[in-house]
Image (cartoon, rainbow, N blue to C red):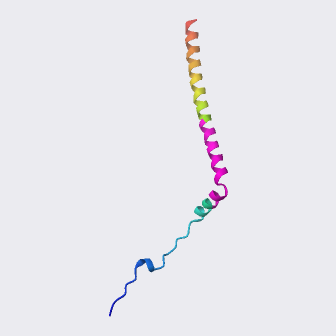
Amino acid sequence: MVATTRTTSTLPRPTTRPSVSTALRAVESLLLAGGQRTARRNAWTAVLEDRRRAKDRVEVQQVLEAVSDRASRAT
């Protein structure tokens, strides 16, 4: 008598269900793919530009305060 063996590939695989948040993200990415990505990129670019301007403002303010301190000491 020959014994038959079943390989694991012939057994049904248990399926895992995606979480609700994963499913919502998938739907969101399908519906808003191009426009949403562009909007986020533009928003991030604006944030970086605002940070750069704020840094420049602080640097200019420090320079102006240093110059005014020197001018007041000279008089």
Q: Nearer the viewer, residue 56 or 3?
A: 3
Screen quadrant of the N terminus: bottom left
> Residue at the front extreme?
2
Q: Nearer the viewer, residue 5 or 41?
A: 5
Stretch of the chain drawn in magenta? 27-48
> Residue at the left extreme?
1
- Answer left or right for 36 relative to 14: right
Residue pictured at 64% horizontal, 47% vertical? 38
Where's residue 73, x and y in %? 55, 9
**Residue 68 sits in which quadrant?**
top right
Where's residue 34, x and y in %? 65, 51
In the rendered view, would you say 1 is above or below 67? below
Q: Nearer the viewer, residue 24 or 38?
A: 38
Where's residue 64, x and y in %? 59, 18
- Predominant SS along the magenta part: helix
**Residue 30 sits in which quadrant?**
bottom right
In the rendered view, would you say 42 is above or below 36? above
Where's residue 63, x and y in %? 56, 19
> Residue at the bottom extreme?
1
Residue pictured at 63% horizontal, 38% vertical? 46
Residue pictured at 34% horizontal, 89% vertical? 3
> Residue at the top extreme?
75
**Residue 48 sits in which quadrant?**
top right
In the rendered view, would you say 55 is above or below 24? above
Count of numbered labels shown in the rendering: 0
Q: Nearer the viewer, residue 42 or 9?
A: 9
Instruction: Examine the structure image and report whether residue 52 is included in the region drawn in magenta.
Output: no
Screen quadrant of the C terminus: top right
